[in-house]
Image: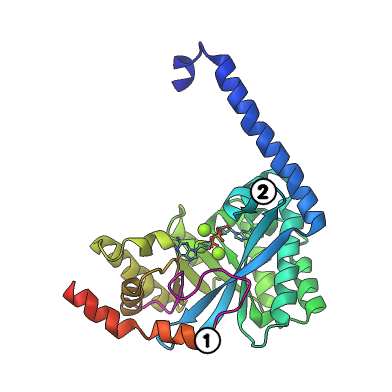
Amino acid sequence: RAKSAHSNEPCFYDSQMDDALKARRELIADLRTALEAEAFELHYQVQAAIPSGEISGYEALIRWRHPTQGLIPPSIFIPLAEKSGDIVPLSIWVIRQACFEAALWPNRHIISVNLSPVHLADPRLVETVRSALADSGLAPERLTLELTESAIIHDRRFALEQLRALKAMGIAIALDDFGVGYSSLDVLRSFPFDRIKLDASFVAEIEHDEQAVSILRSVAALGTTLNIPVLAEGVEQAAQLSIVSREGCSAVQGYLIGHPSRALADAEQVRQTMSLRPHALEELAVG
Ligand code: C2E
Ligand code: MG
Ligand code: MG
Ligand code: MG
């Protein structure tokens, strides 16, 4: 429709497309160089238990220090790497790096690593994880892999086989971005998830939107019924923490308690932030 409307200006559109394509190709080439140069780093975002406020783990989030474009977020280069075929080597680097770094932490917190659907489809994944654990000395119980529903919908049988093999090794599997996919409930029933991460979009509106609160409440109840802890993503405000606590979530992650960072969180500070809850609830009742 838009195409035919603009069919008189092919040159304008073609040159724009050329530019975008060129930029993508350049970025893919840079990505390969970056892999060799190890220009990536992992930042860690703290997760804390409700209501204790104890740190329950960290999520590893990749960052790319591009030589000329500065810090490039994963939302840009992960999809690119998934299409170009570079995601598997990149993902292997992430898994190994996360295991080696977490093995050196002065505590035994869990490290959660995001796993690309493309890597889940790789038959060598289980061996990759096994050797990352063996080489780093990280206990399998300290590693969690985060998967979105999209990882599972393509080849369900093989995905299930992979997840079972990973779990047999002792690592845990979290369902990431829960609620924004196509078949959340079906996926929950059919796959052995140890944790649910409720997508940040459900948390963003809970202060103003009764329906968002109802959904949050239902997911927390579902987690209780299935005996799967539910973590609320993207908690930025004390009032949001109050609500996710009240509605039965087991853990939180978000800017309120910590931004992704190279440094590990200060346990005392996290506990204090988490204990702001009663105060925030009062404010909420007034407002
Ligand atoms: P995700 O796994 O859902 O990670 C959570 C994202 O939300 C992160 O963005 C995090 O920085 C951001 N975030 C955390 N707390 C808050 C908050 O309170 N408010 C807001 N607005 N945002 C918050 P980031 O680091 O840009 O990563 C984006 C996505 O890129 C991740 O979503 C994940 O899907 C993917 N990703 C990141 N690292 C890796 C990786 O090593 N491998 C793969 N395959 N994917 C990765
Ligand atoms: Mg994640
Ligand atoms: Mg998420
Ligand atoms: Mg996400």
Identify which amino acid the numbered label 2 is placed on.
Glu
Identify the residue at horizontal 51%, vertical 13% (top origin).
7
Q: Quadrant of residue 116?
A: bottom right
Disc 1 from disc 2: Cα separation: 36 Å
The magenta region covers 247-265
Asked whether, in this view, residue 180 is left or right of residue 12, the answer is: left
Look at mark 1 in the image and give the residue it sits on.
267
Residue situated in front as seen by the camera: 107 or 262 = 262
Q: Position of residue 175 (x, y in %)?
A: 53, 66
Q: Main secondary structure of the magenta part?
A: loop
The N terminus lies in quadrant: top left
Describe the element under mark 1 as helix, strand or loop: helix
Identify the residue at horizontal 71%, vertical 37% (top origin).
25
Look at mark 2 in the image and give the residue it sits on.
82
Asked whether, in this view, residue 46 is left or right of residue 249, the answer is: right
Question: Nearer the N terminus, badge 1 or badge 2?
Answer: 2
Magenta segment: does it hold 259? yes
